[in-house]
Amino acid sequence: MPNKINRKQKVVVAMSGGVDSSVAAALLKRQGYEVIGIFMQFWAPSGLDYNENRCCSLKAWHEAQDVARILAIPIYKVNFGREFKKQIVDEFLAEYRAGHTPNPCVACNKFIKFDLLLKYSQTVWGADFLATGHYVRLEKTLKQKNIKTKKHYLYRPKDRYKDQTYFLYNLKQEQLKHLLFPLADYTKKQVRELAKKFRLPVFDKPDSQEICFVGRSHYDFLKKYLNLKAGEIVTYDSPTPSDFANGKIISPSGRGRKIGWHQGLPLYTLGQRSGLGLSGGPWYVVGFKRKSNQLIVSKNFYSSGLMKKKIKFKNANWLDDKIKIPLKCSAQIRYQAKPVICMVRKNKSGYVAEFAKPQRAAAPGQSIVFYDEDKLLGGGIIY
């Protein structure tokens, strides 16, 4: 628990109607902050076959209002639909068109929650802080000797299973000093127990597991907005090193045989095994032949070029801008993956992470995130 605070400090809490943000607001209220709830309205796909955006449905708004009423705090709705559509949804679709596998939650944190909402909280409400229900620990460290400025760092939280540091690597020092994460010292079970203790009606509300804006089906969403075209699935069991140069998405020469049909190349990602509809497997997606609209698969995953010791990444952000490269650290190439020791170096177009052992299916468009034990260092986009 934090030390006694100045009771005039004002914090805006991003309230989604979920148990995490609700308990975050309750804890801050009990710590003496002036708490204001903000419910963000995002974009949702049109059509009767789609649900509302899961993060901001009418039901969620009513749940957030109920929590605010119980906590005796004001809550307001703000519409970020246009910005969300441009920065998150349009980029999500553009990445799929390019054959990449995007992570919209990383982008939403970067462009919406901790940029747009933070600025809105400061300019409209004069807030000292923005708080969310993320499971992450924020610590401040006073630099030694002649450097007087404080540095702010993120660490893994108490609940390792709910750890969300992977999605927050784009944060900067100027943002970190205005953020609060009240759930750092709690497990999800404890958060639900607190919600019940505080008599919040969302104490048993299920966690959201899917991308908030895609509606009922990821496949149906992509089909609606990308105009997917079915094509052949072709085996490719004898690749050469040049076919898989640098581990990029490939355009194979076409060797192999047709063994099935795919429903549209953007539905598939490198290394994918499930959902291919093929017998006699296991089969793995190892490449794309875009001119002929063919999906390339192989049974021989380990010789397909998808196991790489070097992973290139760009658009890097380091939470400490004084970090020194080359850098020995650990890396995660997907959420909840096991961290693996690597060496980060610069190259002509960005950075490269070098591993002692080959890593499995680092998909272009996904994030690679770096740590010093439990401390978040930064990350970037795999290409």
Image: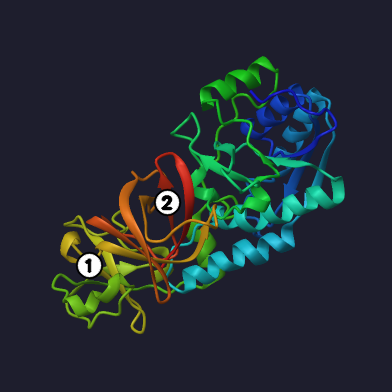
Query: Label 2, on which residue?
Result: 370
Query: Label 1, on which residue?
Result: 305
Query: Horizontally, is 150 left or right of 75 in the view?
Result: left
Q: Nearer the viewer, residue 330 or 368?
A: 330
Whole-percent x, y for residue 365 in the image: 45, 64
Give the residue displayed 74% in from the left and 21% down from the top. 30
Q: Is residue 160 visible?
A: yes
Q: Say which quadrant the C terminus sits in.
A: bottom left
Give the residue displayed 71% in from the left and 62% down from the top. 83
Query: Horizontally, is 202 left or right of 361 in the view?
Result: right
Graded by Cα atoms within 10 Å as few (under 14), some (14 to 19) or many (20 or more), the crowding at tag 2 reads many
Q: How many marks?
A: 2
Q: Nearer the viewer, residue 85 or 62?
A: 85
**Identity, as a three-letter code, of the amino acid under mark 1:** Gly
Q: Earlier in the sequence, mark 2 or mark 1?
A: 1
Whole-percent x, y for residue 168 in the image: 55, 49
Whole-percent x, y for residue 219 in the image: 47, 59
Q: Nearer the viewer, residue 135 or 210?
A: 135
**Identity, as a three-letter code, of the amino acid under mark 2:** Phe
Q: Say which quadrant the N terminus sits in.
A: top right
Give the residue displayed 51% in from the left and 42% down from the top. 164
